[in-house]
Image (tube, rainbow, N blue to C red):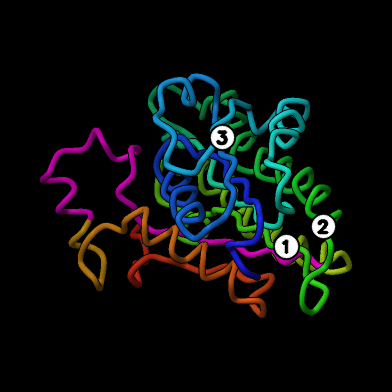
Amino acid sequence: MRVDDCAAVVTGAASGLGQATATALAAAGAEVLGIDLPAAVKAASPPSGVTLVGADVTDEDQVRGALDQVPGQRPLRVLVNCAGVATAGRILSRSGPHDLASFRKVVEVNLIGTFNVLRLGAERIATAEPAEDGQRGVIVNTASIAAYDGQIGQVAYAASKGGVVGLTLSAARDLASVGIRVCTIAPGIIDTPMLAGINDEFRATLASGVPFPKRLGRPDEYARLVTMLVEHDYLNGEVVRMDGALRMAPR
């Protein structure tokens, strides 16, 4: 799949992994539409070559409206789901059982939001003329190594990302008949705005736990992996860990 002759949609594109991915795809020649919450879009500076639109990934009508704004000069062939949220909380703590509303919110955004954009995006991609081998496009989702190594206090996040891992192969098989590949990236500890509030000492502690290279991952490395997955036509139904061989300890 060539990046430079298609349109692409990236969620969570106002910052972090989504912003890096949208920037990389645009630099590679794609027409890129970035989706993020309206407040995030309003506060963001759009990367060069990227059009940002506001939409909640969990809302069907808003996502449909955003997809209607995909530039029409090239077929939509690439969709990358980066939108996500995280929260911390044990199932039982001194304050009682885990808050149900916060658990529901994380699953709603990370899992249901991913599926919502995947299904509506696949509907659009399926209308493109098939390219080589009958391929029409590729969808890349974002999980986390927490799907496999969920730590204490990560039950909501781990459950939501485990769901993304679990749907990958089934989605790839479902969409094979229309020539759409589906892959997922499971990043380790990436230096995104989610880590902006931690101090240098704790950042160094996190980096020291990574076998090699002993540092945090970078959003541009995630973006490069997305581009590789798009261009590698025989990767399908696969979850790729990008974590420096890190396996998270219980806490």
Q: Which residue is mark 1?
A: 137
Q: Quadrant of residue 14?
A: top left
- Callout 3: few (<14), some (14-19), or many (20+) C-alpha neighbours within 10 Å? many
Secondary structure beneath label 2: loop
* Quarter of the image where the N terminus is located: bottom right
Is residue 205 magenta-colored?
Answer: yes
Label 3 secondary element: helix
Q: Relative to 42, is 210 above or below?
A: below
- What is the distance, in whole Å, between disc 1 and disc 2 at their CAs? 8 Å
Q: Which residue is mark 3?
A: 106
Q: Earlier in the sequence, mark 1 or mark 3?
A: 3
Q: Residue at x 59, y 63 (%)?
A: 3
Compared to 68, does 227 lie above or below? Answer: below
**Three-letter code for the amino acid on which mark 3 is drawn:** Val
Quadrant of res 30:
bottom right
Quote the CA–CA distance across marks 3 and 2: 33 Å
Neighbor class of circle 1 (other Cα within 10 Å; few <14, some 14-19, many 20+) is: many
Look at discs 1 and 2 and give the one toward the viewer.
2
Q: Was residue 48 drawn as part of the magenta stretch in this picture?
A: no
Task: Identify the residue at image location x=35%, y=72%.
Answer: 245
Residue 100: x, y in percent? 59, 26
Alpha carbon separation for disc pair 1 and 3: 28 Å
Q: Earlier in the sequence, mark 3 or mark 2?
A: 3
Q: Label 1 is placed on what type of residue? A: Gly
> Pointers 1 and 2 in contact (CB under 8 A)?
yes
User: Could you say whether the residue bearing mark 1 is in a helix, strand or loop?
Assistant: strand
For the magenta stretch, what is the residue range? 179-206
Q: Is residue 22 left or right of residue 164?
A: left
Residue 16 drawn at (x, y percent): 39, 43
Kind of residue at disc 2:
Ala
